[in-house]
Every structure is written in structure tokens, then in C-alpha cells.
Image (spheres, rainbow, N blue to C red):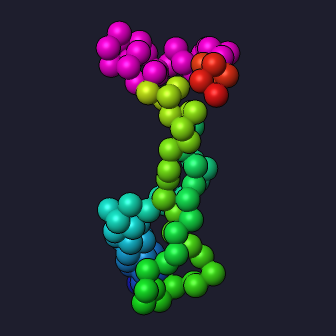
Amino acid sequence: MALGRLPTLGDEFERNKLARETKRRMREATEQGYRMGGIAPYGYRRQLQALPVGHGGDTDKSCVTLEPVPHQAAVVTEIFHLHADKGWSPNLFGKSAGWLAGQAATVS
């Protein structure tokens, strides 16, 4: 019965090793200013960057950074100040999407 568990223990070791390596690489890329996936949050757009020289991975891919969208950035700034200066809860903005859309329309 002990021999039947050996492959399972080896698989678990490799799985944990791969998880550590993936997290390390994600942390390094984030520290270099690259985004690790997903859609850009409101107020930003994805900007594709060329991979660094000497990159050993898939050369068809590119790195992603975020850059502000000027007319949306004003709305994000307003929300930040309402929260920081007046103590408004970020949950209020999610519940009043109409207000957010109205702010975006007046800025653009």
C-alpha cells in the first residue's frame, strides 16, 4: 500500500513546486510594472509592450501595462476624493451606476 502512494506524493511535490515558480514569476513581472491579466479597470486601458530582450518564453505574446484614459481618469479622481475627503463608501458608487455614467458623460 505504501508503494501506491509514492506517485501521489511525487505529483504533489511537483504541483507545489510549479505553483511556487508561477507565483514567483508573477510577482517579478508585477514588480517590473506589468499587468498579470484580465480586463483593464475603469479609467485605464491596456497597453501592449514588447517582451524584454532574451525572453525565453512564447515570443508571440507581449507584456501589458496600464495607461490612464483621460476622460475616465477624472471620474476616478472624483470618486477617490469623495471617499477620502467625505468618507463616502465605494459601495455607494456600485449601487448608483447611473451617477457614475452621468459623471463620465459630463467629463467627456
**Quarter of the image holding residue 85?**
top left
* Residue at left offset 42%, top offset 90%: 54
* Residue at left offset 60%, top offset 76%: 61
* Residue at left offset 63%, top offset 19%: 106
Q: Main secondary structure of the magenta part?
A: helix
Q: Nearer the viewer, residue 6 or 93?
A: 93
Q: Which residues make up the magenta segment?
A: 78-102
Look at the image and tell me whether residue 27 can be seen.
Answer: no
Instruction: Please say whether residue 73 is one of the residues in the magenta stretch.
Output: no
Instruction: Please say whether residue 90 is one of the residues in the magenta stretch.
Output: yes
- Name the side, left or right, on which 59 lies relative to 77: right
Q: Is residue 71 above or below residue 78?
A: below
Look at the image and tell me whether residue 11 can be seen.
Answer: yes
Residue 48 picture location, percent across and down = 56, 65
Q: Is residue 45 above or below residue 52?
A: above
Single out the residue that lies furthest toward the top.
86
